[in-house]
């Protein structure tokens, strides 16, 4: 059995290897100093995720899976009467990129309206991560956005469904 620290070291190696593979595939060199800082931020969000946990009184929740790598995210969102996000929580398992992405995204949507969130683009999530994401890791990075936007779709469909 590995200790918690050994497990984190293994994840770090995997994240670093993935970044190197992505950059090599794109014909790019090593990370810049700024990208190194963002990489450390990603690892920090992975190890100490913001808004981790579940929520029993969520307005809606939704779970998504990345079948290619097995990453999962379940998102819980509380919306007020003005359709503004009051609180957000998530649970999940997966690589540093997918879990840091949902941690960062969950921070960024607090106080936003459902309409503002529906207009988020993949570039917005990549911008939160702050490092180049190659094709190999793109689905990992965007699992958070897909979970959030599909959750909103189901929430809105339920609200407008005939009773």
Image (spheres, grey):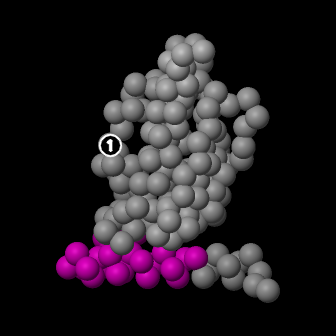
- Please tell me whether residue 162 is drawn above or below residue 60 in the rendered image: above
The chief SS type of the magenta part is helix
Residue at image coords 39%, 49%: 125
Residue at image coords 50%, 18%: 160
Q: Position of residue 88 (x, y in %)?
A: 61, 37
Closest to the observer, 137 or 132: 137
Closest to the observer, 11 or 118: 118
Q: Label 1 neighbourhood size at 10 Å, few (<14), some (14-19), many (20+)?
A: few
Residue 108 in view in this figure: no
Callout 1 secondary element: loop
**Is 112 left or right of 163, judged from the image as shown?**
left
Q: Position of residue 129 (x, y in %)?
A: 41, 56
Residues drawn in magenta:
11-38
Q: Position of residue 55 (x, y in %)?
A: 73, 37
Residue where numbered disc 1 is placed = 121
Q: Position of residue 67 (x, y in %)?
A: 50, 65
Closest to the observer, 8 or 114: 114
Q: Quadrant of the C terminus?
A: top right
């Amino acid at each position: 059995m590995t200790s918690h620290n050994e497990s984190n070291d293994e994840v770090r190696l995997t994240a670093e290897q993935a970044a190197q593979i992505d950059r090599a595939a794109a014909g790019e060199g090593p990370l810049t100093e700024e990208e190194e800082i963002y990489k450390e931020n990603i690892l920090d969000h992975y190890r100490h995720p913001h808004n981790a946990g579940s929520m029993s009184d969520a307005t809606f929740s939704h779970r998504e899976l990345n079948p290619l790598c097995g990453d999962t995210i379940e998102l819980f969102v509380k919306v007020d009467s003005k359709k503004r996000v009051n609180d957000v929580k998530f649970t999940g398992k997966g690589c540093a990129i997918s879990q840091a992405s949902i941690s960062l995204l969950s921070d960024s949507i607090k106080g936003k309206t459902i309409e503002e969130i529906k207009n988020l683009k993949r570039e917005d999530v990549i911008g939160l991560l702050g490092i180049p994401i190659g094709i190999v890791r793109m689905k990992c990075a965007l699992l958070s956005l897909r979970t959030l936007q599909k959750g909103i779709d189901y929430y809105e469909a339920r609200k407008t469904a005939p009773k």
